[in-house]
Amino acid sequence: MWASLVVFLAVASAARAADLVVAYDVMVPMRDGVVLATDVFRPRTEAKLPVLLIRTPYNKADERDVARFFASHGWAVLLQDVRGRYDSEGVWTPFVNEADDGYDAVEWAAAQPFSNGKVATSGGSYAAIDQWLAATRRSKHLAAIVSEFAPSDLYEGFLYPGGAFQEAIGVTWAALVSSRVKQSASLQSEDWPRVFLSMPLTEALRSVGHATPFFREWLRHPAYDAHWKSLSWQGAYEGLDVPVFAVHSWFDIFNVGKGNIDNFLKLRARGAPGRRGAHRLVVGPWEHGPHGTKVGDVEFGEVSRMDLDEAALRWLENVVKGAENGADRDAPVKVFTMGENAWHDYADWPPPGTRTVAYYLGGRRANSSLGEGALATTLPAENEPAETFTYDPKDPVPNMGGGNCCWPQILPWGPLDQRPVERRDDVLVFSTPALASALRVTGPVVAKIWVKSSAPDTDFAVKLVDVHPGGFAMNLADGILRARYRGSFEKPEPLAPDRAYELTIDLGATSHLFLEGHRVRVEVSSANFPRYSRNTNTGNVPELDTETRPARQTVLHDARHPSRILLPVLP
């Protein structure tokens, strides 16, 4: 019976897809006269339809399967190359024109004879950023947003998490989009380790023949200044009367700034009251998008799969078309908990009943996993000795997975075995004993670390790890802070030599079950390279610097300086 039903549905879907009206490269005018190439897919009908708009810098032709899927379910779908990309006119500077162009595209879509005036937008990564920027212009025709794998801010949420430039994605992505079409082939051929070590970093792409003035512009704005504020959508949440379906992942590049979790929470708090119950948040165990059941070194199983197009369609049918399909009764939050590899539905985020538990750094001689660093829920003693290590920018702690993007052959992503970096003396390792019972951690993770440095500016990086009984050390969440931004990302302040400071480091969020017999581990170092640029320790802007100096780093963990990680624990 089920096999026959599957065949019937496949045939019916193919028949619907075949009965579409398709127009390629319709040229849509923007307010300044520039025209953008747009493909139109819609059912063969005289009825007025809701529109789904997808705007992308990565070639609209790559989205045609998605367009056929939604069009076969009664949507008019527009695929548009953004300004200056592929078949669209104009000059592209990433992010700069997307607010106005996105608004103009929504208005054009609503005015078409096949449209009923309701326009939903969809897309992931840059296409999600595009939607948030367009939402700042408040089109009355914007009916819904499907935001997949998006930051909530371009500065702290993408290019400068913790004030440290996210180098690997910044450099490789700038190379990918350095001309009108994607430069995928060049990504395979470059000597990336050499490029990442470029000094100053502003010359990294010039050294391999890529002309990317926008990349150098990013590096000329290391603080949160007017440049980044002009590209912010923080004001878009206020009273926004548009439901949002937000998709996030635990190993996404945007998790360090909370990404779509932050978008979802701000909409629930500040958006139009009547819409707050319509927003949805889905978080999976993926990288920058679901590419399979195995992420990094960890196999999450078939249960981790999710057809995001099907999920988005069901929600859109409900919030835009008014279909009574039960989507309005779904839990607002759906997250995948690693460790037990299961999905959970929650009424809010963090889940109701979550309590914050402090795990304090302790022990002694914590340099490397061979040391005696300890982690416990009890306050440290008054006389616990501090830990010290030397951070040399010429030999930074290398990255070992996590929220990298988007080419694992250049920089691996996801959960990987951390033991190779934990053997280094410039990595402090603090671990609990084997757990007597399982520990469920679900929510935002924050570290508060007391430090001193011999440098006027330096970085501190923290990582949360699950140590399996066999020794496999699985990274779960990580964060970094450029110390000059400890008080504000707008007004950097140098460090006073060897003065103690408490740094608050955001590690993003996670949902993980530490099983009985496992250990909770925290790593503290001063680099995660080349995911983040090296701090040169000179006090100069690191990305513009041409020299480096070693720094003597101290991490305190006594009763007066209780360094700790704050874990969101569920019963």
Image: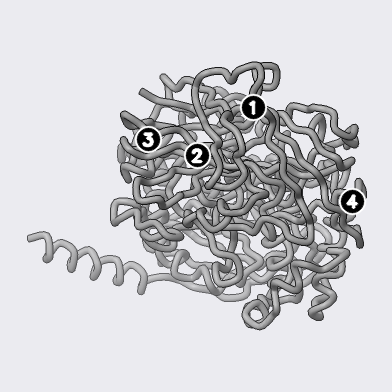
Amino acid at dot 4? Val
- Determine contact: label 1, label 2, CB under 8 Å: no
Q: CA distance from mark 1 to mark 2?
A: 14 Å
Q: Is residue 12 above or below residue 226?
A: below
Give whichever of discs 1 and 2 has the lower sequence position: 2
Residue under the point 71% across and 36% down: 234
Q: Residues within 10 Å of mark 4 (few under 14, many from 20)?
A: some
Of the 4 image quadrants, the one containing the N terminus is bottom left
Neighbourhood count class around disc 1 (C-alpha, 10 Å): few under 14, some 14–19, many 20 upward: many
Instruction: Label 4, secondary structure: give it.
Output: loop
Residue 379 position in % (x across, y down): 56, 18
The mark closer to the camera, 4 or 3, is: 3
Label 1 residue SS:
loop
Q: Which is nearer the N-term, disc 1 or disc 3? A: 3
Disc 3 is placed on an element classified as: loop
Q: Measure the C-alpha gap from mark 3 to mark 2.
A: 11 Å
Q: Residue at x 89, y 34 (%)?
A: 497
> How far apart, in angstroms, are the residues tagged by discs 4 and 1?
28 Å
Task: Tell which of 451 and 178 is nearer to you.
Answer: 451
**Which amino acid lies under the numbered mark 3 shown in the image of this protein?**
Ala
The residue mark sitting in front, 2 or 4, is 2
Q: Amino acid at mark 2?
A: Arg
Amino acid type for the residue under numbered disc 1: Ser
Task: Reply above or below: 92 against 466.
Answer: below
